[in-house]
Image (spheres, grey):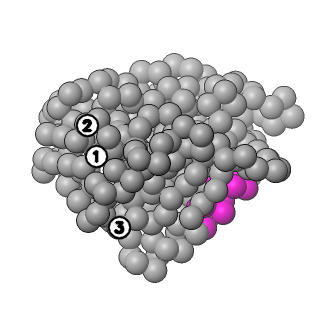
Amino acid sequence: MDRIREAVTRARGGQRIAPGQAGSANPALEPHARFQHEPALETEAFARVHCDFDQFGRHRIISNEHDPVLSAYRVLRTRLLQKMETEGWKTIGVVSPNSGAGKTVTAINLSIAIGSKRGSRAVLVDLDFYRPSVAKYLGLPGVPSVLDFFEGKKSLRDVTVKPDLPDVLLIGNERVSRRGAEHLSSPRADELINRCVNEYGARTVIFDLPPLLGCDDAIAFLPKLDCVLMIAASGSTRTSDLAEARRLLTNAKIAGALLNKAPATGVSNYAYY
């Protein structure tokens, strides 16, 4: 416990702090004791930001190392990492046919689960320019926008922050853009991917992408990625929409599919295929 406390204290010391100080979703677990924080590489180059942990529960985000949801995502993490390791993959897009399937929650929780594994840095990137939600779900208002990077206003490092989670770097966004496909098919998109993998030392780069049906943003970006994780929601994702989304992914490598909100016993409402 002292090691965890010291690690997070070092991470917070002397760095810029974003609005939304961390609260305690579980009175028995202080914020500094929520996660093991042992980054594989130094992260002093990135601004530190503090999540509002009080918001995690309402968005079904993993809030501490004893959260039962973490076990389900550790299984997903292990199976995905095994597959990606075998194939030599580093980048994965999290997609769904339509909104409401839980892709953003999955992208965040998967990042936390990967970062919790010693020596496995995750970089989480919000590229849903229609409904950017990653920063909101983490309780991080006012984070730099990845759109500033695409528009040439800021460097990639300037829009990358280090939240007080396990070994996770975040490239967030709170702005809406109708030029998503243009940005995501540009050379800056290639730079984003290459630097996250090489300069940031990520084992896995996770992109939260817009739904496949309704806009072409994800379709423009997916050819640049190694693989895709498809998210569907039991009771709300229609079979016809899932089939159409699968057709759009004909040329993509699908690492797996996750069924959210599935009726199940126990604590997990997730199924992986």
- In which quarter of the view is residue 194 placed? bottom left
**Residue 73 left/right relative to 254:** right
- In which quarter of the view is residue 118 placed? bottom right
Q: Position of residue 114 (x, y in %)?
A: 57, 58
Residues packed near mark 2 inside 10 Å, few (<14), some (14 to 19) or many (20 plus): some
| Magenta-highlighted residues | 70-78
Front tag of 2 and 1: 2
Which of the marked residues, 3 or 1, is nearer the chain's N terminus? 1
Q: Position of residue 42 (x, y in %)?
A: 47, 54
Q: Position of residue 260 (x, y in %)?
A: 60, 46
Tell whether position 209 is magenta.
Answer: no
Residue 253: which disc?
3
Q: Where is 21 relative to 84, above or below?
A: above
Q: Where is 216 relative to 144, above or below?
A: below
**Residue 265 left/right relative to 204:** right
> Distance of mark 3 from mark 1, alpha carbons?
14 Å
Residue 218: which disc?
1
Say if mark 3 contacts mark 2, CB within 8 Å. no
Q: Where is 115 relative to 130, above or below?
A: below
- Residue underneath mark 2: 215
Q: Nearer the viewer, residue 41 or 266?
A: 266
Residues packed near mark 3 inside 10 Å, few (<14), some (14 to 19) or many (20 plus): some
Q: Where is 12 relative to 269, above or below?
A: above
Q: Position of residue 169 (x, y in %)?
A: 46, 46
